[in-house]
Amino acid sequence: MRKTRKRTGLLIGCLLLGLILPGAAVATDELNEAIREAQEKYRQQTQVEGQLKNLTVKATEMENKIRDLNAKIAQASRDLSAKESAYLSAVQEVDTVRAAAVQKEKEVEARQEALRARSRAAYEEGNISYLAVVFQSASISDFLTRLEYMERMIDNDQNLVDDVRAQKAELEAQKAALELKMAEAEKLKIEAAAAKNYLDASQVQQQTALRENERDQDELMEQMEQLEKDSKELEAKIRELQRQNQSGLIGNITTWPTPGYSYITSPFAIRNHPITGQVKQHTGIDIGAANRSKILAAGSGTVILASWYGAYGNAVIVDHGNGISTLYGHMSSINTQVGNPVVAGQVIGYVGSTGWSTGPHLHFEIRLDGTPTDPMPYFR
């Protein structure tokens, strides 16, 4: 079973100047066309990212369900083993009682046959037996003793027959009870086996679905890689066209974007992305800040993006000139519009957790000719 995938995509094309919307000054039709094409690539990337994110969420759900099914299957296996042991024990008990009942039946027959033999002898000999007792007796006392012995022997035989018959009846009742117990044990065993079979089938279905999900993720990753390649080519083209259309801005970064908050929760470095798990360059810094706290423009410039920006959520991009731009991501709300001029320290939005974010913070980037650079040296 593969773990949660680390090859999911946060592969947004860094087309900062390619997102200039109508109202920003452009000098050539070629730049306009490149911008429109870049916007379409970005739209496709955002769509694929959304699909990929849904698949990763579903994959996590399926993996959790498979783990739960594995635990249930293990318990079902233990239950089935216990039920099978109980059934075998019940079968052994029934077999033992059946054998004892057969033995008692033989004892009853033997006793009854002995009693019948004595009865036949008494019937055939009649009073002769009693006369034999009289003639063989040495005295009246001996006669009475012999006679009493004969009667007691007959009574004892009958009592033994009755006792053995009672024991046999008890064993038959015990056998019947054990057979019911055996039938119930067999029923429970069958139910336990059916439950385990159902769980096994569910596990196979989930594993099949997970494999299909992983194949779909691989296909989307291929699409993402191609879109990223196309976007990088457009990015380079747009940067070149931008150099031919300088805005006259001076490109200064002078102001920390989150007044009162300076703790860096994630620096400009290689890291595991907190949502996708993908290992790649973190293209900015994450500044821990309270939800709805102010976000300031880091320098004077022109707003070239003020909208939802895929994984960045609500975002603003400001062009400061000289190839320098800043990006502010995961805003709860935006306080500016495309084409607006801004000055350093102006409120352009508020901290939030939109897009691919695990909690309120500002994702802040500085890019030089579209390439991410560490923001911290600008403030030292």
Image (cartoon, grey):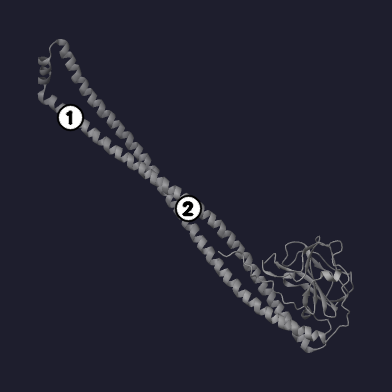
Residue marked by disc 1: 116
Mark 1 lies on a secondary structure that is helix
Camera-nearest label, 1 or 2: 2
Front residue of 166 and 331: 331
Residue 125 in the image: above or below residue 139: below
Q: Residue at x 34, y 36 (%)?
A: 173
Q: Amino acid at mark 1?
A: Arg
Front residue of 322 and 191: 322
Q: Which mark is residue 77?
A: 2
Residue 138 in the image: above or below residue 163: above
Q: Position of residue 270 (x, y in %)?
A: 72, 69
- Label 1 and label 2: CA atoms lie apart by 58 Å
Left or right: residue 234 versus residue 347 is left
Point out the residue furthest to the bottom here: 29
Q: Quadrant of residue 330?
A: bottom right
Residue 209 in the image: above or below residue 154: below
Numbered label tally: 2
Q: Which mark is residue 204?
A: none
Left or right: residue 5 versus residue 15 is left
Q: Is residue 297 visible?
A: no
Q: Position of residue 90 (x, y in %)?
A: 38, 43
- Structural crowding at the residue carrying mark 2, measured as other residues with C-alpha within 10 Å and reported as few (<14), some (14–19) or many (≥20): some
Q: Residue at x 67, y 79 (%)?
A: 227
Front residue of 228 and 131: 228
Q: Quadrant of the N terminus?
A: bottom right
